[in-house]
Amino acid sequence: MLQTFAHRVVRAHPGYFTAAFVGTVVAQALAMTNPVGPAIYGLALAGPIALVCLWAWAIYSVCTPRLKDTIVAGIFASAPLLALVAGVAGWSTNNSPTALMIFGLLFLALWLSASSLEDHYLSNGRNSLGHKLLTTLLLYFGVIGVWVLHPRIARIAGPPPPVPRAQ
């Protein structure tokens, strides 16, 4: 069985995601308080968003194995790309239409991921809007959500493939 990149992401220990997220948030805070070039500022602005969207895309693609639609996959990349463009171009992200668009695209990506996770996990038809909204919030607050959702996602992803032994 070929293990996909998405399976590797969702099976990774939650501590890796937490450490990476804290690192990107610290880098973002440093870039916003110190004078840096526009490219570095854009990367720092997009870093935490890209990490959350990567995790959401991995959950979506594991829970929806028939994923071949590039438009749906592009939704997960649109929020970090818009944040990167906004940072490089110097657009305001404080209470601006750009910030609203970034948040809207991020929420859409997280909603798609949460919806596919709940539809796959609660396949008995008992999932509700409340379950999907709670899962979306856990995905949004990824530092907490990764620890809460990891057991459920790991059950869906299945066991890791066996490691081949050297002969």
Image: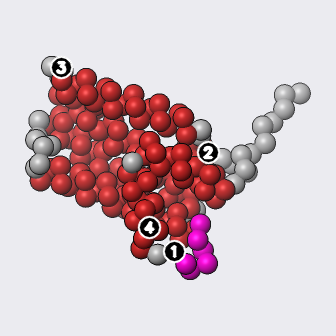
On the image, the x and y values in percent for residue 132 come to: 44, 67
Q: CA distance from mark 4 to mark 3?
A: 39 Å
* Secondary structure state at the residue bearing disc 2: helix
Residue placed under numbered mark 4 in the picture:
132
The residue that disc 2 covers is 11
Q: Residue 117, how many percent across, how many down?
A: 52, 63
Separation (CA) of disc 4 from disc 2: 21 Å
Q: Are marks 3 and 2 in contact (CB under 8 Å)?
A: no
Residue hosting label 1: 127
The residue beneath circle 3 is 34
Identify the image's colour scheme: rainbow, by chain, secondary structure or one colour: secondary structure
What residue range appears in magenta? 121-126
Q: Amino acid at mark 1?
A: Asn
Q: Nearer the viewer's eye, disc 1 or disc 2?
A: 1
Q: Nearer the viewer, mark 3 or mark 1?
A: 1
Closer-to-camera residue (13/65): 13
Mark 3, Cα crowd under 10 Å, few <14 / some 14-19 / many 20+, is few
Q: Neighbour class for label 2 at 10 Å: few (<14), some, many (≥20)?
A: many
By secondary structure, the bulk of the magenta-drawn segment is best described as loop
